[in-house]
Image (cartoon, helix red, strand yellow):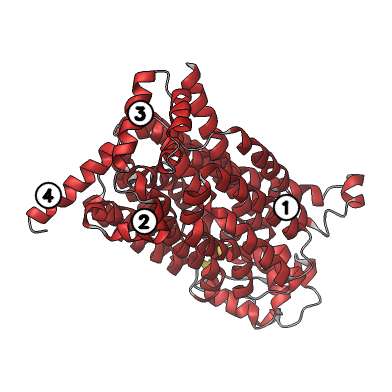
Amino acid sequence: MNGSKRNVFFFAFIVAFGGFIFGLDAALISGTVRFVSAEFNLSDIQIGTVVSAPGFGVLFALVITGYICNMFGRKNTLIGIAFIYILSAIASVFAPSYELLVAARFIGGLAFTSLSVAAMYIGEVAPSKYRGKLVSMIQINIVVGLSAAYFANYLLVDLAHSNFEWVTQWNVQDNLWRWMLGVEIVPAVLWFLLLFTIPQSPRWLVMKGNETRAITILHRLNKNTELAQEQLKSIKESLVDYSETGGYFSSFKQLLESRVRAAVIIAFTIAIVQQVTGINAIMFYAPTVFEQLGVGTDAAFFNAVLIGLVSIVFTVVAIALIDKLGRRPLVIWGLAAATISLFMCYLGFSQAEYSLSAEDIASFSALNSITGLEHIIGTVYHSDIEFKQALASVLTASQQQLFESDLISRAATINAPLISFGIAGFIAAFHFSIGPIMWVIFSEIFPTRIRGVAIPTFAFIASVISYFVQQFFPWQLSNLGAANIFLLYTVSGVAGFALLFKFMPETKNKSIEEIEVYLEGLHTKKVQEGV
């Protein structure tokens, strides 16, 4: 590997490491749900608020991210984002109340723009032949972060029940959720420091009129001096309509121009589809989802670890194939496989039954002092909704939060292998298709003059859908049931497949400027055909 290629890969890896922090933040909270709920006596909506607070925070951040990126540069924006991650993690660990925990996580959500800014930066420094792989590094870092969080949560749960002296001295068991959230602090500090070693984006420097620094960085990124000069010329030509005085809103107005309409349609479609199939419900609530299979709390945490490993393996597959097979076939057929997997989950949950015996109750010593359970013994419930409603009639809200998982594990007659295979299949398909490739597409299809506003705009759209999915998943689980939730995700997958099959083009091995010309021509052709 020559020096310039090493530089590109090194800079891209540092920037993509922000995805690792995002993955940690997203998945660490999944292990805390049960413990935070019990400590603060939270309702389903409040649980959803704790989990989704970053998803709400990022909506505000994305509104101004484009402006900040264009004003201060991609590098400086990333440094600020890393600092916010550190601040949020520390505040979350020491939050004394539900309200302050939500506030701390909301602040962390301001840093979730790291994904869109990272995709923007890598897309601007990477050669076209490596761009797919390098932007996909964001997703591999996300899933490694998710997996690390699941493993850390599983390890901490195991340690909390151990007899190690330091576990007692440091009060791990009573503060388990705080230890889980504290895992994020060290890697966030590391990322903050590493970001000072990367250069500014050469395309942003050209936008700012600093061609001298831009060509110096292009020489670092390309071993061929002549190629660097050609890239500089191409960048300048693509920015011929860019006006520094026009400002952020001028760039935003350009999203409405007919010549970028094809790119806007593609980005809007993929932003909706990526989130509406429920990936963040499964990933952010992984232990909760597995508890619905009746496997118990410890096994649910272990299954979450396995899901994290599946995510890593298939994201690596996507990175290996994206510049060989292309973006379109991976997204289209990966989404088809994901939809089939979601339907398998629906079938498994729709056929489940729940019934508690006297032996089940007797074997659960924590319930010996609770009266009323005898009224539901022997009754067969044909959905998780019916069973949870029966539990709610004899247990307090806090008791149900503490004991529901164990009671489901005793009562459920369910095709757990089918559902587990369906969840694993969905995670696998998502992570070798629409998961990493959305950020690749975002980094490729927008002209340099508007990408500072375009990528955050469509990341904002994806984040809105993600927020609602996270916020209302606990409520949906209690009121709609697992079967209906997965049926909804399946229908969304079918709709997404149809739309992307029609609209999504192939962009591999094209420079950003070549893709711009291609999409403008695609729109012109449709207009001429009267489409």
Q: Secondary structure at mark 1?
A: helix
Residue identified by numbered label 2: 251
How packed mark 2 is, by other alpha carbons closer than 10 Å (few <14, some 14-19, many 20 or more), is many
Give percent across and percent down for residue 508.
30, 35
Task: Answer left or right for 179 relative to 455.
Answer: right
Check residue 129 in the rendering and tell me which mark sits there, or answer none. 3
Give percent across and percent down for residue 56.
55, 66
Q: Secondary structure at mark 4?
A: helix
Residue identified by numbered label 1: 180
How packed mark 4 is, by other alpha carbons closer than 10 Å (few <14, some 14-19, many 20 or more), is few
Task: Answer left or right for 82 relative to 471.
Answer: right
Point out the tag, 1 or 2, that comes first from the N-terminus.
1
Q: Nearer the viewer, residue 254 or 268?
A: 254
Point out the tag, 3 or 4, that comes first from the N-terminus.
3
Mark 1 residue type: Met
**Residue 184 vertical placement versus 374 (above, below):** above
How packed mark 3 is, by other alpha carbons closer than 10 Å (few <14, some 14-19, many 20 or more), is some
Point out the tag, 4 or 2, that comes first from the N-terminus.
2
Check residue 525 in the rendering and tell me which mark sits there, or answer none. 4
**Residue 478 vertical placement versus 75 (above, below):** below
Q: Quadrant of residue 31?
A: bottom right
**Residue 228 vertical placement versus 489 (above, below):** above
Give percent across and percent down for residue 348.
45, 60
Q: Nearer the viewer, mark 1 or mark 2?
A: 2
Q: Nearer the viewer, residue 68 or 245?
A: 245
